Structure formats: C-alpha cells, structure tokens
C-alpha cells in the first residue's frame, strides 16, 4: 500500500458536509476509518461533477473515486478501474414546488423548465424519457453536481415547477427546502460505491477486507443511523413552519439564559435549545398531563434534586435542565458509551429515566447487540414495552417507543438549527449568537 491514498469525490453535502453536527460526514468518515485501518493518509480532492471525478480516476490522478449515485454503464477494459461493493441504493426523485401542481402525468413534463444537477445519470433519465414522451423538457442545469445552492434558490421560485434530484444527496438537505416536495420516483436506483484503481498495490485487497469488516460488525449501519436515521421519511411542513417561526419569535427571549447555562455545563447552546423546543416549544408555562412543568419540563423530584425554587422561572428551568443533562451524561461514564451515542443515551435518560436506560443497555448486551450504540438502543427500547423483556429488568416497563421518538425529534430539531444558522434565510440572524457561543461538548 502507498503511504497516501488519493481520493476524488464530488462536492456534495453528504461527502463534504456544511450542515451536519455529527462528524466529518457519512462517506468521508468511512474513508477516514479506512485510512486508519490500512495505515495510510488521505488526500481528498473535491470535483464539481461526478464525470470529472471519474475522469481523474481513469487518468490515474486518483486512487479511489466516491461514486455517490454515479454509475458508469461500462468500465472500459483499457483502464485498470474496478467497482467496489454497493453500500447504498437510492432512486431519482421528482420534486415539485408546493405553489404549483404536483406531477399528475409524465406528459406534463413537456415544455416545462426542470432543474437537474449536472449529473450524467440524472440527465440520462430524460434522454430515456424523450422516446416515451415525444417531447423535450427544458432542462436547467448548473455547472456542478451539487443540489443545495441551486435548490435553495429554486425553493422560492415558483416559476420552476419541477426538480429532479438523487435521493441520497437530497435527504440531508430536505429539511431546509420547505417548498419542495417529492412527487414521484424516476428511473432505476442509483448506487453508492467506491471505484478504485486496480494497479495500486494492495489497495483492492485492503478495501475488500475493510468492507467485509464494517458490514459484518455493524459499523456502516451505525454510521447510517447517526447521520440519517433521525430524518423522517415524510417531512411535516407545518411542523417546520412552526419551528422556524418560534426560532424567530421566541428563542431570542431566552438567549442570555441558554448561553450562560451552555457555558457552565459545557453543552452546545443549540443542542440545549433543541431539547427545550421538544419539551415545551419555548413556552415557559408549559405543563404536561404527567405534571412536569416549564421550559425544560422538569418533574418535582428533579427540581428538588437540583434545588430549584420555581420550575416556571425561565432561568432556573434552563439552568436546571442543562445541569441535569450533564448529570445524566456523567452517570453514563461507567457504561462505556462514547461520543454522540452517549449524548443520545443521555436524552433517552432525560425522557424515561436513567434506570430505564441502564435496563436497555443490559438488554442489548443480553440479546447480542452492541450496548454502546444508539442504533442498538433504538431497537431495544420498544422491546421494553413487552412483558417478555421488561419482566427481566430492574426498573420494569418503560414507554420505549416514546423514548425513540423523543431522541430522534431532538436530533432533527438540532440538525435543522445547525443548518439554518449557516444557510441564507431569516433564521440565520436569530441563530448566529448561539453559534458564536457554541462550546465543544464532546466530553
């Protein structure tokens, strides 16, 4: 193996993320772990289009190409390039602007302006359609394969009714495009895989061994869950509208208290705000049917533990909630849970109680799942609603489905706030103070 592996990749959100708080990006993190596994360094080069990235590989200017939904029809026998295993498949999606009618028949594509990223596989779909439609849609394409910038622009442009995108690249940016909705699937599924040079000594063998390892030990499934598992299959646009409105109108009221608590307990202010929104929608007088109160929906027992005099006082509620989150996080140190998994366990404990999280960890271990992975606990928590499982635990029955929905909902709100803070839009100015106040809270 050479000391440095050159990687060509198209510059899209899931490969070079600008929005995700979870890490370097799903595809990039897989590459980084491969580099560590094989004892090499990475030299990453972003390209504007998939075709340009593949051309660099074909010319020997790269050793690996990330084929994110890009599938060349035939690999020429004259170039030493081979295909790695498929690790994801996703269709092309036709989107429509909600201020225009959705697609009711393919013939409505005739004489329409349709945005398509500069992606040869997506463009080929329209070449295939021409024979069936006997017409040619007017394709609006850009100079690159990225979706985000162009779709952000077309999100507010009702004159462009349809947009064709690749589902895998669209998924992480979908929550920020509140006027674009999926109307249909088009064409065959596009594949995610690595293409590699077969003339680089040891590379093919190392990649085969690495992919066998991460597919058999659950690594790739864990990373897919971390980066994408919280994004709902269908976007609730009314919920997003309400959330964005509350960011502008209510979140600034608690800025001082959120920033103070986040500094004191080393918690990202936007993470703390996401918990608060899930709990109370920024309503300081919120009360649930179980009797929890305030912005952070604290129980009487928790308030007493934290020595709070009023759960309805915004400062006490926010500071107390942050202190309790840090308390739960510290308690999980003995359970060998690290990184983001530990924070997601912490959220589950905030919702259902630390004892039930301990039960879920023990149950996961008992049934042969990784007890330190949120993906495992996401599968185990619902089992604790069943007598067969919770009868063998210390703390008994818990609302397991609620715990899963609770954690994923906070992840979703946190992800959206992190993205809205850096994307053009009304919310950016309201979220900017919280980004400035962000602290490292990995420990």
Image (cartoon, grey):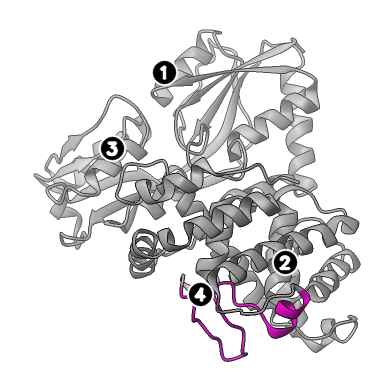
* 4 vs 3, front mark: 4
The magenta span reads 283-305
Q: Which residue is mark 1?
A: 52
Binning the other alpha carbons within 10 Å of mark 2 as few (below 14), some (14 to 19) or many (20 upward) gives many
Q: How far apart, in angstroms, are the residues tagged by discs 2 and 1? A: 51 Å
Closest to the observer, 155 or 386: 155
Labelled pair 3, 2 in contact (Cβ < 8 Å) = no
Q: Which residue is mark 4?
A: 280
Q: x%, y% of residue 214? A: 75, 41
- Residue nearest the viewer, comparing 89 with 227: 227
Judged by depth in the image, the label closer to the viewer, 4 or 1, is 4
Foreground of the two, 331 or 405: 331
Image quadrant where residue 323 sits: bottom right
Mark earlier in primary sequence (4, 2): 4
Residue 102 image label:
none
What is the CA distance from the residue labelled 4 to the residue labelled 3?
A: 35 Å
Q: Position of residue 311 (x, y in %)?
A: 61, 79
Mark 3, residue position: 150
Name the residue: 80% across, 20% down.
39
Q: Residue furthest front?
A: 309
Q: Is residue 3 left or right of residue 66?
A: right
């Amino acid at each position: 193996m050479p000391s440095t592996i050159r990687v060509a990749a198209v510059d899209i959100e899931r490969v070079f993320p600008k929005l995700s708080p979870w890490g370097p990006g799903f595809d990039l993190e897989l590459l980084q772990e491969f580099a560590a596994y094989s004892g090499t360094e990475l030299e990453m080069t972003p390209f504007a289009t998939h075709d340009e990235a593949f051309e660099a590989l074909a010319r020997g200017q790269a050793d690996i190409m990330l084929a994110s939904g890009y599938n060349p029809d035939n690999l020429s026998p004259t170039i030493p390039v081979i295909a790695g295993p498929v690790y994801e498949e996703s269709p092309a999606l036709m989107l429509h602007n909600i201020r225009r009618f959705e697609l009711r028949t393919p013939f409505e594509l005739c004489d329409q302006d349709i945005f398509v990223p500069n992606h040869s596989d997506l463009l080929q779909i329209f070449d295939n359609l021409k024979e069936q439609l006997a017409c040619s849609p007017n394709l609006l394409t850009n100079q690159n394969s990225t979706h985000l910038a162009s779709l952000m622009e077309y999100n507010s442009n009702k004159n462009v009714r349809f947009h064709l995108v690749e589902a895998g690249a669209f998924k992480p940016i979908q929550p920020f495009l509140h006027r674009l909705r999926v109307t249909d699937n088009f064409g065959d599924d596009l594949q995610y895989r690595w293409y590699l040079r077969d003339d680089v000594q040891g590379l093919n063998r190392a990649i085969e061994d690495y992919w066998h390892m991460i597919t058999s030990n659950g690594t790739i499934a864990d990373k897919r869950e971390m980066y994408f598992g919280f994004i709902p299959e269908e976007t609730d646009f009314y919920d997003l509208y309400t959330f964005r409105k509350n960011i502008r109108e209510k979140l600034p009221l608690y800025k001082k208290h959120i920033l103070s608590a986040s500094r004191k307990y080393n918690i990202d202010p936007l993470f703390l705000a996401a918990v608060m929104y899930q709990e109370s929608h920024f309503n300081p007088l919120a009360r649930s049917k179980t009797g929890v109160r305030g912005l952070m929906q604290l129980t009487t027992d928790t308030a007493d533990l934290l020595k709070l005099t009023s759960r309805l006082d915004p400062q006490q509620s926010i500071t107390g909630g942050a202190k309790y989150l840090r308390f739960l996080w510290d308690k999980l140190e003995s359970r060998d849970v690290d990184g983001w998994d530990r924070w997601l366990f912490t959220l589950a404990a905030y919702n259902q109680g630390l004892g039930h999280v301990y039960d879920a960890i023990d149950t996961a271990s008992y049934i042969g799942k990784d007890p330190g992975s949120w993906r495992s606990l996401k599968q185990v928590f619902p089992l604790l609603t069943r007598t067969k499982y919770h009868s063998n635990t210390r703390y008994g029955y818990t609302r397991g489905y609620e715990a899963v929905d609770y954690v994923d909902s906070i992840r979703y709100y946190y992800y959206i706030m992190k993205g809205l803070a850096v994307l053009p839009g009304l919310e950016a100015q309201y979220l900017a103070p919280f980004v400035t106040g962000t602290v490292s809270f990995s420990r």
